[in-house]
Image (tube, rainbow, N blue to C red):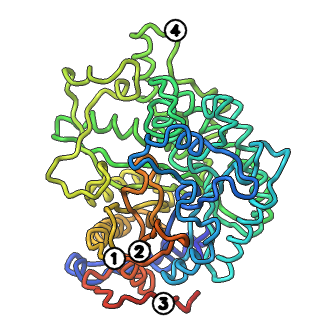
């Protein structure tokens, strides 16, 4: 059973009893009792059935159909892993791994074909109901993400996250989903990775909808998205939590930014503020609001550039209070680390205005750092430890659930590189737990191979390999699946474990 807020005191006691000596860290390290293990996916990346049973178009459908070769392999998510039809096999995979929870997202346009609550698509609603029931049948807790980047295209035609009315549109959608599944879902995530939604989708062209109005679009999105999240939180907190006693939070993407030298500490601090604290601070800090340096730099740059006001819309005092505290856990997606330096002669390479120019420093990853298939994914476990420590110190040690952590390669079942990454990052997480960080759960990205956004199917993150040539989208466990199953079963990180078998069996605990 998953940890809830009421049970967290007992969890803290077990953390204090779970200290591991340095000499044991290369042998077996135990996770605290009650620690949660899971896997994660997102609807557009694995679901398929893009127009099945009344679903309407979302921004990724629209973009990939209009210009297929924006994607690295000219692919799309029309079928993907076909989880819409293969969901029982997906639950079987969860049972094989023995995981405690499964994080997945609901497709807004599958539930509400007009994007609004005037019409509920019964077939789409029934699909998720059946999926949730199938998980619960085997004591696997569903962890539902309301929004994982697949905005209905109709709403994007109205401005999407740049339109302030989207806070109400999202709140209406959230209320519908709570009514449908609130009696069975105890763990809700409002929005996945707001920085990626806003910066990559509205201030850049690296994610749908590719609005690419640099230095403006991402900041309009930022305020509207945070208010939308807060509205969805308060609806659950006031209308549904009293009946169902669930929890609701947001998942933030946070890579760690390390100063290149001791002279670059200020530059690294600014990078951490811009890249992830800008989204955490309004919710988790005692003061609320966007971070001071974030607001001041954007305002100063805006004035220099001739704008009559800051390009970052301000929260009113009432909005600051409305957003503050609206997350029961700190949901964290983390993959890698960057080094930071400031060089005024190089900063001019960024467009003006832009998010990168406002930030005003340079990020890079040394070539000698080990890396996966994804350009950004260098293996830097010490950065994970430092990030978790910074979250503990900056935000009064919130309860953290790692909602994504994973490694990409180019395929194959013998994935020792993924196993090494997971062990190193899990060990770094245990170091943070040993020092008092309140980390309650960990989820691998991803249960299976998926459509990896602009990279299509060229990068593989799955514990299970998906055969995209097979009509059934056959799933086969990789070596990493066996290792993760062993970790979940033993509740321990065993550096000497060898799977030693090619047969995946269902854990009888589920």
Q: Residues within 10 Å of mark 2 (few under 14, many from 20)?
A: few
Quadrant hosting residue 465: bottom left
Report, in whole angstroms, how far the alpha carbon at label 1 lies from the one at label 3. Answer: 32 Å
Question: What residue would you read off at disc 3?
Answer: 505
| Residue linked to disc 2 | 16
- Disc 4 versus disc 2: nearer the observer: 4
Residue 15: % across, % down? 43, 74
Q: Is residue 366 above or below residue 66?
A: below
Q: Dot 4 lies on which element?
A: loop
Viewport quadrant of the C terminus: bottom right
**Residue 174 in the image: above or below residue 421:** above
**Measured Cα–Cα span from mark 4 to mark 2:** 53 Å
Q: Who comes first in sequence, dot 1 or dot 4?
A: 1
**Which of label 2 and label 3 is nearer to you?**
3
Which residue is the site of mark 4? Answer: 308
| First of labels 3, 4 by sequence position | 4
Residue at 48 percent of width and 75 percent of height: 475
User: Where is the N terminus found, in terms of image quarters?
Assistant: bottom right
Query: Could you tell me which residue is drawn at 49 percent across and 60 percent down?
Result: 403
Left or right of residue 506, residue 162 in this image = right
Along the viewing direction, whichever of 294 and 487 lies nearer the viewer: 487
- Can residue 394 be seen here? The reply is no
Residue at image point 81% right, 46% down: 117
Q: Tell whether label 1 touches label 2 (CB within 8 Å).
A: yes
Q: Which mark sits nearer the N-terminus, 2 or 3?
A: 2
Per the image, the residue denoted by label 1 is 19
Count neighbours of disc 1 (C-alpha within 10 A) and say few if under 14, some if 14 to 19, many if 20 or more. some
- Residue 263 in the image: x percent, y percent? 17, 35
Real-space Cα separation, disc 3 to disc 4, in angstroms: 64 Å
Residue 354 place in picture, x, y as percent: 40, 24
Indicate left or right for 506 with 459 as reference.
right
């Amino acid at each position: 059973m998953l940890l809830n807020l009421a049970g967290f005191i007992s969890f803290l006691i077990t953390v204090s009893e779970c200290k591991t000596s340095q000499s044991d860290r290369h042998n077996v390290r135990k996770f605290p009792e009650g620690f949660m293990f899971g896997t994660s996916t997102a609807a557009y990346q694995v679901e398929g059935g893009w127009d099945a049973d009344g679903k309407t178009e979302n921004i990724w459908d629209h973009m990939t159909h209009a210009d297929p070769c924006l994607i690295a392999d000219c692919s799309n998510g029309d079928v993907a892993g076909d989880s819409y039809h293969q969901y029982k096999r997906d639950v079987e995979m969860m049972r094989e791994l023995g995981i405690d929870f499964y994080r997945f997202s609901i497709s807004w346009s599958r539930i509400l074909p007009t994007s609004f609550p005037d019409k509920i698509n019964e077939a789409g609603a029934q699909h998720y109901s059946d999926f949730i029931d199938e998980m619960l049948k085997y004591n696997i807790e569903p962890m539902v993400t309301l929004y994982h980047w697949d905005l209905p295209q109709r709403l994007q035609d109205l401005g999407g996250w740049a339109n302030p009315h989207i806070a109400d549109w999202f709140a209406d959608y959230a209320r519908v989903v709570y009514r449908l599944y609130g009696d069975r879902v105890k763990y809700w995530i409002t929005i996945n990775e707001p920085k990626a939604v806003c910066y990559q989708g509205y201030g850049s062209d690296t994610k749908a909808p590719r609005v690419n109005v640099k230095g403006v679009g991402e900041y309009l999105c930022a305020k509207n998205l945070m208010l939308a999240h807060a509205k969805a939180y308060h609806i659950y907190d006031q209308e549904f939590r009293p009946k169902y006693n669930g929890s609701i939070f947001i998942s933030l993407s946070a890579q760690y930014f390390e100063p290149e030298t001791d002279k670059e500490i200020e530059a690294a601090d600014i990078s951490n503020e811009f890249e992830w604290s800008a989204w955490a601070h309004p919710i988790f800090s005692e003061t609320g609001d966007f971070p001071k340096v974030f607001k001041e730099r954007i305002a100063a740059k805006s004035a220099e550039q001739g704008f009559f006001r800051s390009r970052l819309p301000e929260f009113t005092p009432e909005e600051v209070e409305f957003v503050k505290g609206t997350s029961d856990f700190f949901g964290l997606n983390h993959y890698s680390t960057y080094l930071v330096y400031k060089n005024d002669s190089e900063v001019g390479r960024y467009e003006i205005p832009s998010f990168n120019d406002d930030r005003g420093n340079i990020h890079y990853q040394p070539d000698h750092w080990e890396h996966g298939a994804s350009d950004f994914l260098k293996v830097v476990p010490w950065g994970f430890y430092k990030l978790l420590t910074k979250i503990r110190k900056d935000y009064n040690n919130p309860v953290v659930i790692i909602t994504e952590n994973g490694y990409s390669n180019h395929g194959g079942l013998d994935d020792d590189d993924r196993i090494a990454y997971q062990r190193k990052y899990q060990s770094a997480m245990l170091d943070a737990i040993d020092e008092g960080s309140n980390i309650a759960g960990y989820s691998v990205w991803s249960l299976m191979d998926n459509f990896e956004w602009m990279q299509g199917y060229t990068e593989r993150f799955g514990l299970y390999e998906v055969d995209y040539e097979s009509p059934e989208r056959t799933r086969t466990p990789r070596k990493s699946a066996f290792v993760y199953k062993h970790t979940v079963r033993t509740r321990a990180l065993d550096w000497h474990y060898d799977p030693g078998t090619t047969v995946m069996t269902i854990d009888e605990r589920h």
